Image (spheres, rainbow, N blue to C red):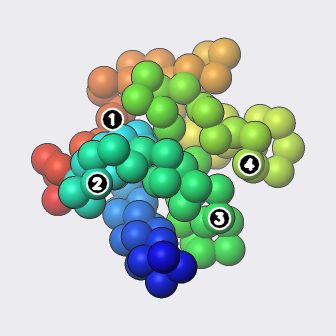
Amino acid sequence: MQAETLNFFDKVYQVARLIPYGRVTSYGAIANYLGAARSARMVGYAMNGSVAKDVPAHRVVNRKGLLTGKHHFDGTSLMQQLLESEGVKVVENQIQDFEKVFWNPSKEL
């Protein structure tokens, strides 16, 4: 299972690196793209371990646009700050105009 998990995580990182500046996607959208529709939680686990992998994990949120991964960033608002520096508006941990900034790898790749 270890090699299989790492392989899946690497695929997640490859997709996450393609998320355009100023756009976001969801854990589920990445899982769907990878043919693992029920693996959104595994995508989340991958994002938690992505800090040293040069992955823009701040651009991956839950299906409602909530910054559910923010606790895995240094400081309490780093995820929000990174998104806002890219022009993504966040209010109370919720991405505003989520549909407008949402990037769907299944449609875009």
- Rounded to the nearest angstrom, the CA distance separating label 1 from label 3 is 23 Å
Q: Are marks 1 and 3 in contact (CB under 8 Å)?
A: no
22 vs 105, nearest the viewer: 105
Going by the numbered disc 2, the residue's amino acid type is: Ala
Q: Which residue is mark 2?
A: 36
| Residue 33 x %, y % | 23, 54
User: Which is more N-terminal, label 2 or label 4?
Assistant: 2
Q: Are marks 4 and 3 in contact (CB under 8 Å)?
A: no
Which of the labelled discs sits on residue 72, or is there none?
4
Q: Which residue is mark 3?
A: 49
User: Which is more N-terminal, label 1 or label 4?
Assistant: 4
Q: Which residue is mark 1?
A: 102
| Residue 38 x %, y % | 33, 44
* Secondary structure under the numbered disc 3 in the rendered image: loop
Which-is-in-front pick, marks 1 and 3? 3
Q: Is residue 37 left or right of residue 24?
A: left
Q: Are marks 4 and 2 in contact (CB under 8 Å)?
A: no
User: What number of labels is visible?
Assistant: 4
Going by the numbered disc 1, the residue's amino acid type is: Phe
User: Which is more N-terminal, label 3 or label 2?
Assistant: 2
| Residue 20 x %, y % | 36, 54
* Secondary structure under the numbered disc 4 in the rendered image: helix
Q: Looking at the image, can residue 33 be seen? A: yes
Q: Looking at the image, can residue 14 be seen? A: no
User: Which is more N-terminal, label 3 or label 4?
Assistant: 3
Q: Is residue 38 left or right of residue 71?
A: left
Q: Residue at x 34, y 51 (%)?
A: 30
Quadrant that contains the C terminus: bottom left
Q: Residue at x 54, y 26 (%)?
A: 66
User: Which is more N-terminal, label 3 or label 1?
Assistant: 3
Q: Residue at x 75, y 49 (%)?
A: 73
